[in-house]
Image: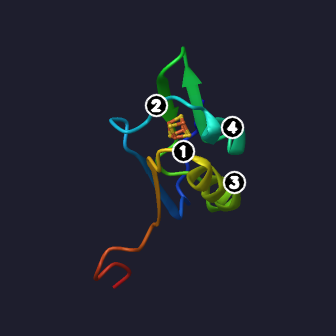
Amino acid sequence: MFPSRKTSEMRVVVDLNRCQGYAQCCYAAPESFELRGAEILVYDPAPSAEHRGRIERAAQSCPVRAITVQADEPAAGAGR
Ligand code: SF4
């Protein structure tokens, strides 16, 4: 469903204790969020940066603010 990507530049975390299954994120970014059944949310935790706009819209549309989006910063000392 969510193919792994080696070039991800984003991290997405959903607080599943907060998520109420409203599915707004699934409408905003269906390539990254999917509801299975009435309440089980599955999502891509490391989506491609090309989806950034839709994922940020998904985070903003979540009624309970369960979605956190972070830039995937390189680790300190990486690239030496
Ligand atoms: S919009 Fe928020 S509450 Fe609704 S399914 Fe997505 S994460 Fe859960």
64 and 80: which is toward the camera: 64
Identify the mark nearer the N-term, 1 or 3: 3
x%, y% of residue 41?
Answer: 49, 29
Q: Is mark 1 within 8 Å of ligand 1?
A: yes
Q: Which image quarter holds the N terminus? A: top right
Label of residue 54 in the image: 3
73 and 37: which is toward the camera: 37
Q: Where 40 falls versus 57 (above or below)?
A: above
x%, y% of residue 5?
Answer: 56, 50
Q: Where 65 falls versus 22 (above or below)?
A: below
Marks 1 and 3, how far apart at CA: 16 Å
Closer to the eye: label 4 or 2: 2
Identify the residue shown where x is 53% and y is 16%: 38
Mark 1: which secondary structure?
Answer: loop
Label of residue 10 in the image: none
Residue 19 found in image quarter: top left
Identify the residue shown where x is 69% and y is 37%: 30
Residue at mark 2: 20
Closer to the eye: label 2 or 3: 2
Identify the mark nearer the N-term, 2 or 3: 2
x%, y% of residue 24?
Answer: 63, 38
Identify the mark nearer the N-term, 1 or 4: 4
Q: Assess whether mark 1 and mark 2 are in contact (beta carbons under 8 angstroms).
A: yes
Q: Name the amino acid, label 3.
A: Arg
Residue at mark 4: 30
- Tell whether 54 sits left or right of 14: right
Q: Residues within 10 Å of mark 2 (few under 14, many from 20)?
A: some
Identify the residue shown where x is 70% and y is 44%: 28
Marks 2 and 3, how far apart at CA: 20 Å
Marks 1 and 4, how far apart at CA: 17 Å
Label of residue 63 in the image: 1
Mark 2: which secondary structure?
Answer: loop
